Image (tube, rainbow, N blue to C red):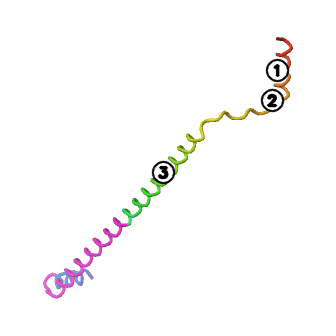
Amino acid sequence: MNAWVASGMTAAVFSPRIRRVLRKGVVYGLAGALTAGDAVVAAARGVTHEAEEVAHAASTEAGEVVREARAVGHREPEKAEPTPKEKKKMEAAEVGA
């Protein structure tokens, strides 16, 4: 079997037709690899562009929320109704005063 491989390799090296076929295969294979690489790079650029647009939109929306909050102004939160324990403490403080 090794002799068959060796004779096949020798025929490939010395045959112009086989060398031409191998050369075309290498050229087409390399062209395909370059084309696939370009497609991957283009897809990555598209994803990056979309991510930048989303980040910009989020930033703009956050800025609008901040502007609205500033326009409304800061309000103190409403106080909750005191618990019964707190009421007793307040009554005791009023009696003691």
Q: Is residue 68 left or right of residue 8?
A: right
Q: Which mark is residue 11?
A: none
Rounded to the nearest whole Å, what is the CA distance between mark 3 and mark 2? 41 Å
Residue behind mark 2: 82
- Badge 2 vs badge 1, beta-carbon distance below 8 Å: yes
Q: Residue at x 50, y 52 (%)?
A: 58
Q: Is residue 25 magenta?
A: yes
Q: Earlier in the sequence, mark 2 or mark 1?
A: 2
Q: Earlier in the sequence, mark 3 or mark 2?
A: 3
Q: Residue at x 22, y 77 (%)?
A: 27
The label nearer to you, 3 versus 2, is: 3
Q: Which mark is residue 60?
A: 3
Q: Is residue 44 magenta?
A: no
Assess disc 1: are there few (<14), some (14-19) or many (≥20) residues with their C-alpha within 10 Å of its C-alpha: few
Q: SS for tag 1?
A: helix
Q: SS for tag 2?
A: loop
Q: Is residue 47 depicted above or below 83 in this figure?
A: below
Which image quarter holds the C terminus? top right
Which residue sits furthest front?
71
Magenta residues, start to end: 13-42
Residue behind mark 1: 90
Rounded to the nearest whole Å, what is the CA distance between mark 1 and mark 3? 48 Å
Q: To which quarter of the image does residue 43 belong?
A: bottom left
Q: Residue at x 55, y 40 (%)?
A: 70
Q: Is residue 61 depicted above or below 24 in this figure?
A: above
